Amino acid sequence: MTKILELKWINKTLAKKQVLFDVHLEVNEGEVYWFLWPNWAGKTTTMKCIMWLIKPESGEINILWEKSLNIKAKKEVWFMPENTYLYKHLTWREFLRFNWNFFDLKKDQLESRIDELLEKVGLSQAWDKYLSSYSKWMLQRVWLAQSIINKPKLLFLDEPMSGLDPIWRKMVKDLLIDLKKDWTTIFFNTHILADVESICDKISIINSGKIIVSNKLVSEIGKSLEEFFVEEVMKDTPNLKVN
């Protein structure tokens, strides 16, 4: 299979403290890849390096067959952060129209694409109100729609199910399955293990800035992801208390 994302021995220091140690992982085209971590493990720093928001001291990041997240790669990538930062003086349609301008997309496809997206995230019947009047779970779905507006080849999702009830968490799962069928590669983080273990192909686990499980096939684990995750973190951190 073709590697669409590869991190080779990434090291990063912040505030004179090393926070990433030889981080390595690889994601193949068309996979749903799950990045797991306990708190303060280095997940956010790793994501920032991938998205080229900060530069590692050493190592190499290949993304969409490019040496960095350059202009060419950016057209095929999108990212949904854990905390949504939306222009709340816009309506959801205005917000999606605004984001359409970041990509080389045909104007005559705009309204039909917006209708399609809002149907996917269950907002087609919502009133066209300003985003400032929306609840957290509605904003989460607007941001999810925005993250796939360009039909990305590689999609990064950071806690996409945060603030959603079980019904809308299932909606996100179904959306991820549809994206996978269209050969969108998905790299995402979430602590809601039971909700998504059935749709993931591979996982990596980072702890204290080091990869302790790398590119593990979910089908080979043979137990629940929660049990596997806790066991691996405890092996790597024997003094950790979980009571």
Image (cartoon, helix red, strand yellow):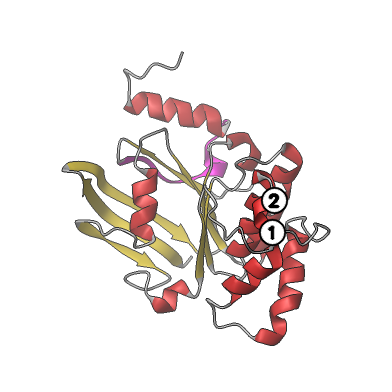
Percent of width and height locating residue 26: 40, 57
Query: What span is in magenta?
Result: 210-223
**The quadrant where residue 30 appears:** bottom right
**Amino acid, disc 2:** Ser
Residue drawn at x 35%, y 37% is 41
Tag shown at residue 130: 1
Give whichever of 126, 190 is nearer the camera.
126
Q: What residue is shown at x 72% (from left), y 74% (from top)?
A: 113
Q: Residue furthest front?
A: 89
Query: Dot 1 lies on which element?
Result: loop
Name the amino acid, label 1: Tyr
Question: Is the C-beta separation of discs 1 and 2 under 8 Å?
Answer: yes
Q: Which residue in the protein does label 2 denote?
A: 133
Position of residue 131 relative to residue 29, above or below, is above
Residue furthest to the top: 243
Q: Residue furthest right?
A: 125
Please report the residue visible at 42 percent of the width from the left and 79 percent of the height from the top: 72
Up/down of 159 relative to 87, above or below? above
| Image coords of residue 68 (percent x, y) | 33, 69
Which structural element holds mark 2?
helix
Distance from Cα at disc 1 to Cα at disc 2? 6 Å
Q: Residues within 10 Å of mark 1 (few under 14, many from 20)?
A: some
Vertical order, 51 against 227 (above or below): below
Q: Mark 2: few, some, or many residues within 10 Å (few <14, many ≥20)?
A: few
Q: Residue at x 61, y 64 (%)?
A: 146
